Image: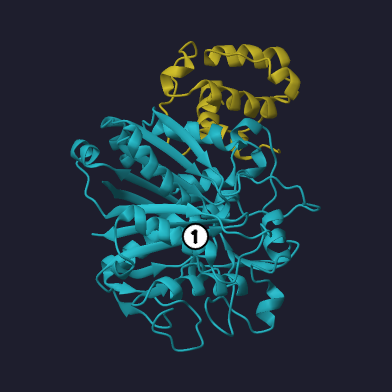
Amino acid sequence: MIFLTEYRTACTEQTELLDEVFHPQRVHWFPDTYAKKDTGLIYAPHQLASKVLDNKLLACLRENPVKTAFILASGNAHFAGIEPLESKKTRLSYTYKFMPLALTQVYAGRIASSCGAKDLVMTDASACASSLKVMMDITNLLKYGFERFIVLGVEDTVTNSVLKFFGDSGASLKLKDEENGCIPSAFDNKNHGFHIGQGAVFAVFETEKSIKISNSQPKARLMGAYSASEDFSNAMGQREDGQGFMKAIEGSVLTAKCNYSDIKIVKTHGTGTFSNNKAEGSALRAVLDDFVATSYKQRIGHTMGASGLLETCLLLDDIKKGMIPEIPNRTEKDHVFLSEPTPTPQGLLLSLSAGMGNIYSSAIFKPY
Amino acid sequence: MKFLELFNKVARAIRPAHHDYADITVMNEPIGNSGLDSMDGLMIGIYMAEIYGIPEEIAKEMQPKTVQDYLDFINKHKTKDPKGSADDIVSGVNW
């Protein structure tokens, strides 16, 4: 069995309008993480990661060694912010003086050493499904005798290129959308979409043996996880019937050895785009009966590669407080895709993510 | 401004925030004793090259084992001398 024993998160509900970028839009960001970017040696994602790297926790992990895998879930792998589309300098612009550190695997190795992870260091670039997709990697690594799994999920870096990419595709809300009266929401007929956000999560998963050694307390049990793709030729799109989500959910239910009816709480991918509303909404209605669903992207922005696990940890915090938060800015009353906060129901938590390039991830947790 | 003081400031600037770093106090002490690894050493070299106006292609030849090695290399190749306190120099580098 695998338990989530520790996590640290970094994200912000505050937004700032970046009007100098290609598509002016609001962004959830930490300006201080960009403060030293012009040195060319100190990159924003590394600064952001430092917000979730707790020295005390790292020391505890080093001092209680077991066979450990470290996984850097870095989303789309332009980790330190390559700017192929940049035509003018913005507050997000980068300078490079030491390219090796911009490589995801090199950075992963650097952080893994400070966690005492000496047995396997790996990275994942499954786009915005990245940090949740590695839940399946963890369940697989268990078969090879690993006892501890450390996951660092960090957004791919908010850059002019990233904002242009999401803006071009109509996924992120631009200033002109807001001027037309649209604000972020999901599964709603009026409001939709999200802002881009910086976010990071550091999470430790352990077996019973590792828990005994580190004397940690389980916060949730990772019951099962699965990732899947769907039969669709457009790698940038989603099938409206939600086949990809359904396949991922089915796989996670099988690996969790639970029933669909055990699932009562859903952390949706919840981008609020028209295509995701249809795909994810269809999939959930097709396989589940009695559940409540929420989304965090309208609160903290879409933190890309970090989003799946980061949002799961935020939901575990909310579950502990006894309330499942509503999906912000819903304009219709809804007891399933919540328009209002609701007391936490008893049951399992299903967490979903999706990434461009045809990847859907699902993980099932039992909250403690 | 003492070179050792500047070195420690630069080392703290490039070191990830969560990594331990113990100030080096002796010029001939191996830099590894402070918790720095060879990658940190390279990054410090690039930073120092910027401060002392050493071209990047020359800076890459730097292979220091001690702070004294850095200083010797810098004295041989520098094209300028920084002014002010170590804090001013580190924060005021015009990249």
Where is residue A18 shown, x and y percent of the image? 67, 64
Query: Is residue A260 depicted above or below A94 in this figure?
Result: below
The chain assigned the colour cyan in the figure is: A
Q: Colour of chain B?
A: yellow
Query: Is residue A8 depicted above or below A191 in this figure?
Result: above
Most foreground residue, B31 or A165: A165
Question: Which residue is found at the position 56% from the left and 32% from the top?
Answer: B86
Query: Is residue A328 depicted above or below A153 in this figure?
Result: below
Question: Which residue is found at the position 55% from the left and 30% from the top?
Answer: B10
* Residue B79 appears anywhere in the view: no
Q: Residues within 10 Å of mark 1 (few under 14, many from 20)?
A: many
- Give me the chain letter of mark 1: A
Give the residue type that dot 1 points to: Ser
Residue marked by disc 1:
A353
Where is residue B27 shown, x and y percent of the image? 49, 14
Question: Which residue is found at the position 66% from the left and 17% from the top?
Answer: B74
Rendering quarter of residue A179? bottom right
Left or right: where does residue A367 sit relative to residue A335?
A: left
Rendering quarter of residue A183? bottom right
Most foreground residue, A321 or A266: A266
User: Which SS class for mark 1?
Assistant: strand
Question: Considering the image in quadrants, where does the C terminus of chain A appear?
Answer: bottom left
Left or right: where does residue A47 sit relative to residue A85?
A: left
Most foreground residue, A22 or B67: A22
- Name, please, the residue furthest toward the right: A87
* Residue A165 appears anywhere in the view: yes
Most foreground residue, A261 or A34: A261
Where is residue A338 shown, x and y percent of the image? 41, 80
- Name, please, the residue furthest toward the front: A231
Chosen colour scheme: by chain
Query: Is residue A81 depicted above or below A172 in this figure?
Result: above
Where is residue A162 shown, x and y percent of the image? 67, 56
